[in-house]
Image (spheres, rainbow, N blue to C red):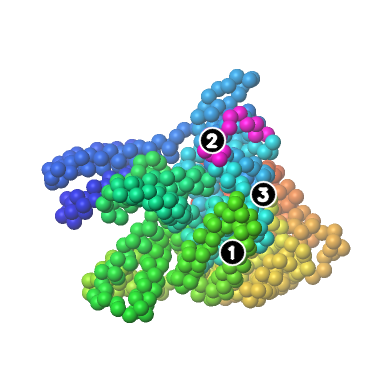
């Protein structure tokens, strides 16, 4: 074992167990299957036992590390590969209501159109006979009124379905995410009234829930602005239901999302709020003061409000980390346990992983611990580097401002890979925004918010005054944040790090930690900058192909047309009509970032239906766009006006298209086949689908026909102007009202691609359409079976590849 590792393992006994446990969890989650890992793990155990003599009395640490590794690996392996019971598999196929008994595990999370909570399935009823069945499920209710408490047991009827992911290379793995939270299957209850309470929650949850409801009611009564109310609800209680989406994006773009998370600051303020008044009272007793109990007793009493508050906001990983740290600090003070911060940090980390190894795969857990580690370790390098005492107040002020800026930059740098991989956007103004606004939220907003809701119980008029002042402060802060977020360099859209960027990133971290040894730090930093710049020095090869990428966006449509000269054109953005799930944000944007598409030369809206248009709203705000193409017949359309106005605000050039428009872009030619300037009959009689943009794109001998959602009526009008096209984008997701036999015969495609959601309620594509395509010998690719589809041509031949050729695994 290297001397450095041996030295640190002896100084911090929990270091090796923590690393071992984390390694086992990551191996199970992202490594090879268990059958391939079994023998290497046994070999590792043998090698470690040969190294035991080097530990000099620390053999127990190595033994605990090995047990931790196997425990973490085995726990996650079992959780991720748990087989569904036969009954559940049958229920997901039948889709009929099943009477079940469930126990809620968390507070109900209320969205704009539905509510959901995770629960434990206790069993089900078959002809009034109860049959036990233990499984983690997630309940969804199509209502925004839900007051479920952790620990409550309900009897209800539910329909079951399996979680699915979008079948794109970089889409969020929703089934894997649910499994890390112990959820194996989804269930839908048609109404809150169908939840019949069988057993109440434990008394402590009922008490905390009452306080929680009163706080939320007070904020709703005394604060009128939705932005300010949403900020305070998330800041004080951890409820995100009423946070406007625009405000949430603003906090993320400015790098201030962390100030809204329930953190150690909340528990520290509560500890101080209860400790000092109690210490003053107990110190009045001479006897208690002399024997030191005046200091110890208030600390013990102050633990109860901390635990009460943690139960009230919900036991999320960040809350557990914060309350765990606070409890251990209090116990350390009571027991006079003189240990360094690193030991306490590792103790909390290890105990949380011991309680639930899946915490390591939770984003909030990762962000929480990495942020604390960055704030502790990186500023210490500058503090130790300071050679002289700073005697003047302005010198100390400048020094600590520098430390604050450096800490913020260090946190953002440490979190950079996670932010890039998860959100595909990194805030460049985060250091300035944190320096300006973190003191306001930590010193002013949070303490006043806690006092305001506290005074509501005793002096409502005082609480109302405090909350009204907070409303104005938060509103002013949001206005300033909006000005900063509007700056052109406010945020940087990025994809996941490549191997060369990972090397550069790790060298940069080492360089920052070696600042006191400035020569080594400068060397590492210089190499890091060189590696980051290396890809920019190598000219990027532009493929001499026309490529069409059809994303899997469920029952919707979104495609990226990449021209041989490197220009990128996005056609539609997908969207769910009756859901607040943003496909533009959660599916299309990540794929574009991973494909290194940082700007779009044009965005095309074929027609203003939600399943084609809704995702474009987010993309308009996040990606620089040169032109916006749309059918001229939709210019005054009510659903389109908001998107058009958004494009105007973003200085995007509007380009209405109509039948007969033709132009060339290099070797690629574009021809608009539909709709005309004036429809053959009264325009009011035409559905939006039949007014869809139909564009023919040709590259040398190969043409792509992009049909939007045009139906038989539109196809009949286009028929006289149709030309042969080798690749057909099947209209209207394969609906029976499109792709008529005459239309297919005139187009005569070799390859047909279509976008449809798996098990969609419209049962598309229609069997008749598939039959017509197959009878003509046309190769069919569909997103519900093949996932993301990529078709390209060099002008002579057609090439295609799909994300999957069989049902995608969830792990």
Q: How crowded is the residue under tag 3: few (<14 C-alpha within 10 Å), some, or many (20+)? A: few
Farthest right residue? 682
> Toward the viewer: 214 or 403?
214
> Toward the viewer: 45 or 255?
255
Q: Name which of mark 1 and mark 3 comes first in the sequence.
A: 3
Residues shaded magenta: 194-207
Give the residue drawn at x 38%, y 54%: 369
Q: Name which of mark 2 and mark 3 comes first in the sequence.
A: 3
Residue 203: which numbered mark, if any?
Answer: 2
The answer to whether mark 2 and mark 3 are in CB contact below 8 A is no
Q: How crowded is the residue under tag 2: few (<14 C-alpha within 10 Å), some, or many (20+)? A: few
* Residue 37, quarter of picture: top left
Asked if residue 286 can be seen in this view, the reply is yes
Give the residue drawn at x 26%, y 42%: 65
Nearer the observer: mark 1 or 3; the answer is 1
Q: Secondary structure at mark 3?
A: loop
């Amino acid at each position: 074992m290297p001397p450095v590792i041996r030295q640190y393992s002896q100084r911090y006994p929990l270091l090796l167990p923590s690393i071992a446990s984390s390694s086992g969890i990551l191996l199970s989650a992202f490594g090879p299957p268990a059958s391939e890992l079994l023998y290497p793990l046994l070999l590792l155990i043998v090698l470690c036992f040969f190294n035991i003599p080097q530990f000099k009395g620390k053999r127990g640490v190595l033994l605990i590390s090995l047990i931790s590794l196997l425990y973490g690996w085995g726990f996650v392996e079992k959780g991720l590969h748990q087989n569904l019971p036969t009954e559940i598999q049958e229920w997901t196929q039948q889709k009929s209501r099943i009477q079940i008994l469930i126990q809620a595990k968390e507070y109900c999370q209320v969205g704009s159109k539905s509510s959901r909570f995770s629960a434990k399935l206790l069993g089900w009823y078959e002809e009034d006979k109860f049959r036990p069945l233990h499984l983690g499920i997630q309940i969804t209710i199509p209502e925004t009124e839900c007051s479920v408490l952790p620990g409550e047991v309900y009897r209800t009827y539910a329909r079951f379905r399996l979680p699915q992911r979008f079948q794109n290379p970089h889409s969020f793995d929703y089934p894997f995410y649910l499994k890390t939270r112990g959820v194996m299957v989804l269930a839908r209850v048609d109404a809150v009234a169908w939840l019949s309470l069988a057993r109440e929650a434990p008394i402590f949850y009922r008490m905390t829930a009452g306080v929680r409801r009163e706080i939320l009611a007070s904020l709703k009564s005394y604060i009128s602005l939705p932005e300010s109310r949403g900020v305070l609800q998330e800041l004080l209680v951890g409820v995100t239901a009423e946070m406007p989406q625009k405000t949430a994006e603003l906090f993320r773009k400015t790098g201030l999302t962390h100030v809204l998370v329930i953190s150690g600051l909340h528990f520290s303020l509560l500890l101080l709020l209860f400790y000092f008044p109690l210490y003053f009272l107990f110190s009045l007793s001479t006897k208690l003061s002399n024997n030191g109990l005046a200091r110890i007793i208030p600390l013990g009493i102050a633990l109860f409000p901390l635990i009460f508050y943690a139960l009230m906001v919900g036991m999320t990983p960040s809350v557990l980390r914060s309350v765990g740290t606070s409890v251990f600090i209090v116990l350390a003070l009571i027991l006079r346990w003189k240990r360094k911060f690193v030991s306490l940090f590792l103790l909390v980390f290890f105990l949380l992983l011991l309680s639930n190894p899946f915490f390591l795969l939770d984003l909030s857990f990762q962000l929480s611990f990495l942020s604390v580690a960055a704030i502790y370790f990186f500023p210490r390098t500058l503090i130790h580097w300071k050679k002289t005492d700073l005697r003047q107040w302005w010198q100390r002020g400048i020094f600590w401002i520098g430390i604050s800026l450096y800490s913020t930059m260090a946190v953002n740098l440490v979190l950079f890979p996670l932010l890039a991989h998860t959100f595909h956007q990194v805030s460049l103004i985060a250091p300035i925004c944190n320096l300006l606004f973190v003191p306001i939220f930590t010193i002013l907003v949070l303490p006043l918010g806690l006092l305001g809701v506290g005074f509501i119980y005793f002096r409502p008029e005082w609480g109302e005054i405090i909350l009204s002042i907070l409303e104005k402060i938060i509103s002013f802060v949001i206005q300033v944040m909006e000005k900063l977020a509007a700056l052109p360099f406010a945020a940087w859209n990025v994809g996941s790090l490549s191997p060369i960027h990972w090397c550069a990133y790790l060298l940069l971290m080492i360089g920052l930690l070696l600042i006191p040894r400035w020569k080594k730090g400068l060397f590492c930093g210089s190499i890091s900058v060189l590696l980051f710049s290396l890809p920019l020095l190598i000219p990027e090869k532009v493929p001499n192909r026309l490529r069409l990428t059809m994303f899997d966006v469920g029952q919707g449509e979104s495609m990226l047309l990449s021209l041989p000269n490197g220009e990128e054109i996005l056609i539609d953005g997908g969207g769910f009509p009756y859901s607040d799930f943003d496909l533009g944000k959660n599916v299309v944007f990540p794929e574009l970032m991973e494909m290194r598409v940082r700007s779009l030369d044009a965005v095309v809206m074929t027609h203003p239906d939600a399943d084609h248009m809704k995702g474009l709203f987010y993309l308009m705000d996040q990606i620089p766009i040169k032109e916006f193409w749309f059918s001229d017949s939709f210019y005054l359309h009510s659903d389109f006006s908001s998107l058009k106005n958004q494009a105007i605000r973003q200085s995007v050039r509007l380009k209405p298209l109509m039948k007969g428009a033709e132009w060339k872009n290099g070797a690629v030619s574009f021809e608009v086949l539909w709709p005309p300037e004036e429809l053959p009959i009264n325009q009011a009689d035409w559905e939006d689908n039949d007014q869809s943009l139909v564009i023919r794109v040709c590259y040398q001998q190969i043409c792509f026909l992009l049909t939007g959602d045009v139906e038989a009526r539109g196809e009949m009008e286009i028929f006289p102007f149709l030309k042969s096209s080798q690749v057909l984008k099947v209209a209207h997701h394969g609906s029976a009202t499109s792709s008529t036999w005459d239309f297919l015969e005139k187009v005569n495609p070799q390859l047909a691609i279509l976008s449809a959601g798996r098990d969609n309620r419209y049962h598309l594509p229609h069997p008749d359409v598939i039959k017509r395509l197959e009878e003509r010998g046309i190769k069919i690719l569909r997103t519900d079976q093949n996932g993301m589809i990529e078709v390209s041509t060099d002008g002579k031949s057609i090439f295609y590849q799909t994300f999957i050729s069989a049902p995608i695994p969830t792990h």
